[in-house]
Amino acid sequence: MAKNKDSMSNILVVALSVCFACSIVVSATAVLLKPQRIANKDADRNKNILQAAGLYEPGFSRGGDIDELFSSFTLRLVDLEEKTILDEVAAEQLGIDLRRYDQRKASKNPEISKDLTTAEDIASISRRARYSVVYLLHDDNGRVDKVVLPVHGYGLWSIMYGFVSLEGDFNTVSGVTFYEQGETAGLGGEIVNPVWRGSWVGKRIYGADGDVKLDVVKGRVDLTSQNAVHQIDGLSGATLTSNGVENLITYWLGDEGFGPVLNQLQSGAI
């Protein structure tokens, strides 16, 4: 009987030792791989920003072409409550690293985010972070040539995350990309299709009255229509996803989003 007890004790000791050793290995691996995970996340973000701006080309390498081109952008922090744009120094005073800021995480922090009312929540995101990072590309004369804005909103099945890029008139679309979405493959999932994304180039967000006019229509755009410059072909069989894309643009480029700051940039006030 004593021998059986000793055997059981030995088994437990060995099992616990193995579990402890495995936990150490897993923890150490997680720590060692964290820098690589961060680097991969940064590279994916940078690639999508370049795609939205129309600057990415197939064959660009991570840590090479992508990083070099992305370094041409100036990062700025937008205070969506105060409708102001802050430089890197002001962001640091708020404890925000522009290259590491996680807007999605911030939107869950009640101290730096807000609940949206039903009337405000056009994009069906429930909460909005107070701050957002935007990406400015200047020309040789120091004027803003492009601005890339992060956008997100609900489609049929998921929140769609992406970037929209505007030309230096802060109205004409130079590109759009969606890097995370869970819409139906072959239907709403076509928001990632390069051909459809390419149809956005040259479209105008705002009308003469300054309101967001971009419209993802049902079917194809009538090119003879006076509104064609604001219209995007709808996604076949994906009306709710199409509506979601239109709504997220309306929200993020409207008064609750980047609209006021874009107006200031356009007027030269900032």
Image: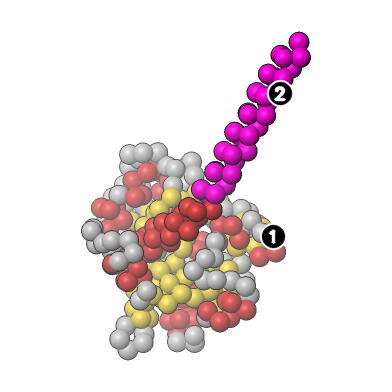
Asked if residue 64 can be seen in this view, the reply is yes
Tell me if 199 is positioned left or right of 108 in this view: left
Q: Amino acid at mark 2?
A: Ser
Element at label 2: helix
Asked if residue 204 can be seen in this view, the reply is no
Q: Earlier in the sequence, mark 2 or mark 1?
A: 2
Residues shaded magenta: 1-30
Q: Residue at x 43, y 81 (%)?
A: 266
Q: Quadrant of residue 138?
A: bottom left
Q: Amino acid at mark 1?
A: Pro
On the image, the x and y values in percent for residue 113 come to 65, 62
Q: Residue at x 57, y 76 (%)?
A: 91
On the image, the x and y values in percent for residue 237 come to 36, 39
For the view shown, which residue lies furthest in the top direction?
1
Q: Does the stretch in magenta take in 103?
A: no
Question: Mostly what secondary structure, the magenta segment?
Answer: helix
Q: Residue at x 54, y 61 (%)?
A: 102
Which numbered disc, 2 or 1, marks the residue closer to the eye? 2
* Screen quadrant of the N terminus: top right
**Residue at the disc numbered 2:** 9
Tell me if 121 is positioned left or right of 157 in this view: right
Of the numbered discs in the image, which one, if any, rests on residue 110?
A: 1
Q: Nearer the viewer, residue 193 or 140?
A: 140
Q: Residue at x 71, y 23 (%)?
A: 9
Spatial CA distance of label 2 from label 1 is 50 Å
For the view shown, which residue lies furthest in the right direction?
2
Total marks shown come to 2
- Structural crowding at the residue carrying mark 2, measured as other residues with C-alpha within 10 Å and reported as few (<14), some (14–19) or many (≥20): few
